[in-house]
Image: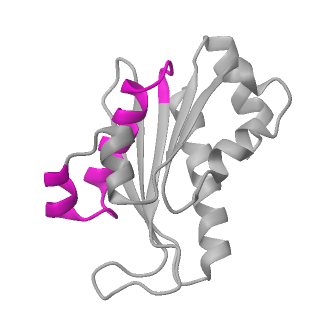
């Protein structure tokens, strides 16, 4: 993923970006802000590791968390939409998943759910099964996928 290209495209469109991250703990925001000049397009990042943080900072509904669990497309969608509502951004990506170690039969290690919200467009969500490749590898893969999603949001 070419982060400078992503930032340049956002700047050309006058789009500000926000991130809402759980299992990646701010890695997407860090990848964006590692690039000089990123302040022109990166508004803020939310690290919402707990369910309470997802509710308090992003407005994720307790009912959604209870019905689907934190690692779900429904929660990823609400996280992305909450990042837009609680920022000056027009584009937001959200990540929630199980980096490992561990997981369960129903929510295995390596499952990561993503949300992508852009003003004036329908919010998208998806689940990627990265597999039990270890915590660091899952988190890096999730970061890279989120950056690629942001690029699609600028198309």
Q: Residue furthest right?
A: 36
Residue at (48% x, 20% y) in the render: 90
The rendered magenta stretch, by its main secondary structure, is classed as: helix
Q: Position of residue 82 (x, y in %)?
A: 35, 34
The quadrant in which residue 154 appears is: top right
Image position of 79 with respect to 101: above or below: above
Please tell me whether residue 6 belongs to the stretch shown in magenta.
Answer: no
Q: Position of residue 56 (x, y in %)?
A: 33, 43
136 vs 34, left or right, is left
Residue at (71% x, 38% y) in the render: 32
140 vs 106, left or right, is right
Image position of 5 with respect to 88: above or below: below
- Which colour assignment does the render follow? one colour
112 vs 64, left or right, is right
Q: Position of residue 24 (x, y in %)?
A: 58, 59
Q: Is residue 137 visible?
A: yes
Please tell me whether residue 88 belongs to the stretch shown in magenta.
Answer: yes
Q: Is residue 8 visible?
A: no
> In which quadrant will I find the C terminus?
top right
In front of the other: 131 or 18? 18
Where does the magenta region start and end? Answer: 62-91
Residue at (46% x, 46% y) in the render: 94
Residue at (13% x, 53% y) in the render: 63
Q: How many marks?
A: 0
In front of the other: 153 or 102? 102
Q: Position of residue 31 (x, y in %)?
A: 73, 45
């Amino acid at each position: 993923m070419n982060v400078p290209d992503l930032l340049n495209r956002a700047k050309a469109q006058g789009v500000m970006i926000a991130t809402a991250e759980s299992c990646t703990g701010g890695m997407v925001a860090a990848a964006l802000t590692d690039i000089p000049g990123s302040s022109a397009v990166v508004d803020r990042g939310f690290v919402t590791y707990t369910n309470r943080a997802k509710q308090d900072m992003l407005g994720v509904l307790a009912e959604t968390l209870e019905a689907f669990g934190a690692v779900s497309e429904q929660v990823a969608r609400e996280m992305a939409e909450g990042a837009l509502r609680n920022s000056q951004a027009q584009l937001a990506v959200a990540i929630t998943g199980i980096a490992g170690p561990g997981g369960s039969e129903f929510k295995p290690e390596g499952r990561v759910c993503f949300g992508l919200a852009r003003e004036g467009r329908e919010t998208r969500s998806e689940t990627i099964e990265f597999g039990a490749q270890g915590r660091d590898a899952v988190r890096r893969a999730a970061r890279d996928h989120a950056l690629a999603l942001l690029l699609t949001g600028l198309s």
